[in-house]
Amino acid sequence: MIVGVPKEIYPGERRVALTPAVVPMLAKAGLEVAIEAGAGTSAGYPDAQYQEKGAKVLPDRASVFAQSDIVVQVLGHGANDKNGASDLSLMRHGQLLVAFLRPLASAETVQQIAQTGATAFSVELMPRTTRAQSMDALSAMASIAGYKAVVAVADALPRIFPMMTTAAGTITPSRVLVIGAGVAGLQAIATAKRLGAVVSAYDVRPAVKEQVQSLGGRFVELPLETGDAQDARGYAKAQDEAFYAKQRELLGKVIADSDAVITTAVVPGKKAPVLVTEVMVKGMAPGSVILDLAAERGGNCELTHPGETVVVHGVTILGPVNLAGTAPYHSSQMYARNLTSFLTNLVKDGKVRPPESDEIIRETLLTQGGEVVNARVREMLGLPALVAQS
Ligand code: NAD
């Protein structure tokens, strides 16, 4: 079977779905790689490296789609909301597609993918089980984004992070607050600690307290009822507006005492909760920095402009939309490993395993035979349930 890698077309996207290192691993599983010329160049992987590892280089996008049994992408249609639709006419019935497809965002885009007849798997739907950990692209990208968020904040802050005792006096360390201590948040805590900041963190899920503390962060406890903050899949549950209002009130003072705030709070399939209001921004010292990692999902700060940096009331607010993509060498390396684990589980002895045989295949399967077949996605997008076929 041929696994095809088209070049990413989202404007400014530098990642690539497979790297040369995974080509032999896929070959062992009977999967041959065909890559569009130049697909890996901006991530630091020239065509020659793919060829050395046994991949075929094809001249254009149309040939990659035409010759592949399985197409793998970073941002597929849906996740690529700029020009991803241009791939729809290249997909064909029965062809497999594995990519970020943003399945819970729009019923229209998932239905458009379904209409091509492709069998599409969305990496966002990966179950959070031990076996699926090596395939978990959301976690891989979140780790890089958490690290990069701190690097960006350190750069934007008019202060340095560490304490410094010099002949010219002593500098006190910067105080960094991380709101949302999931995968990205924990990586941000660890990175800010390494740079010498005093780090505190808050999350609605009390279960993360020990993880924050083990990284040397202080866990901010707010007197909020958070008993059922976590769902069975380990994600935060959406709360009502009264809860968020109380949370904002309690967070105000902690935010005012911080030099930098990194927010990462999201709830799957929902707009990110607003946790930092304009009044709270006003309460921060001039020169403070907020980096809103939830910018893409509507933002945790009400002044965030996705994809932009704004200065309001003397506070710099960064709303980056694709931080993982700014470290394309390593984010591609991690994503390629995620896909390789996924593909070698999906295809055994040259045959695609049926979804009934495996939880990972079943849960990530989004479209098949012209239909959106994922029950969770149908429910969240308000599509009627499919009638079970016996
Ligand atoms: P996420 O990206 O969905 O959310 C980021 C964080 O924001 C979460 O920790 C969430 O609790 C928090 N949050 C949501 N609403 C909030 C609010 N109002 N105030 C403060 N914080 C809020 O989550 P994630 O980073 O993808 O991971 C969530 C959990 O799942 C983590 O504990 C992670 O360790 C776990 N996980 C497990 C596996 C696995 O077992 N295979 C894989 C990945 C993640």
Image: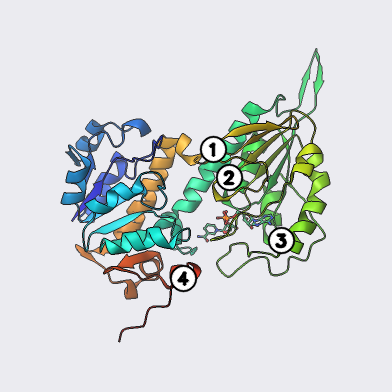
Amino acid type shown at disc 1? Gly
Q: What's the distance in space between the residues labelled 2 and 1, CA to CA?
A: 8 Å
Marks 3 & 4, CB-CB < 8 Å contact: no
- Identify the mark at residue 376; answer none if there is no mark: 4
Q: Position of residue 324 (x, y in %)?
A: 48, 41
Marks 3 & 2, CB-CB < 8 Å contact: no
Of the numbered discs 4 and 2, the one sitting upstream in the chain is: 2
Amino acid type shown at disc 3? Pro
Of tags 1 and 4, which is closer to the observer? 1
- Identify the mark at residue 295; answer none if there is no mark: 2
Q: Residue at x 61, y 54 (%)?
A: 272
* Ligand 1 within 8 angstroms of badge 3 C-beta: no
Amino acid type shown at disc 4? Arg
Marks 2 & 1, CB-CB < 8 Å contact: yes
Secondary structure of the residue carrying tag 3 is: helix
The residue singled out by tag 3 in the image is 206
The residue singled out by tag 1 in the image is 307
Locate the C terminus and report the quarter of the image it occupies: bottom left
Q: Residue furthest bottom?
A: 390
Of tags 3 and 4, which is closer to the observer? 4
Of the numbered discs 3 and 4, the one sitting upstream in the chain is: 3
The picture quadrant where one finds residue 388 is bottom left
Q: Position of residue 180 (x, y in %)?
A: 66, 51
Q: What's the distance in space between the residues labelled 3 and 1, CA to CA?
A: 31 Å
Of tags 3 and 1, which is closer to the observer? 1
Amino acid type shown at disc 2? Ala
* Ligand 1 within 8 angstroms of badge 2 C-beta: no
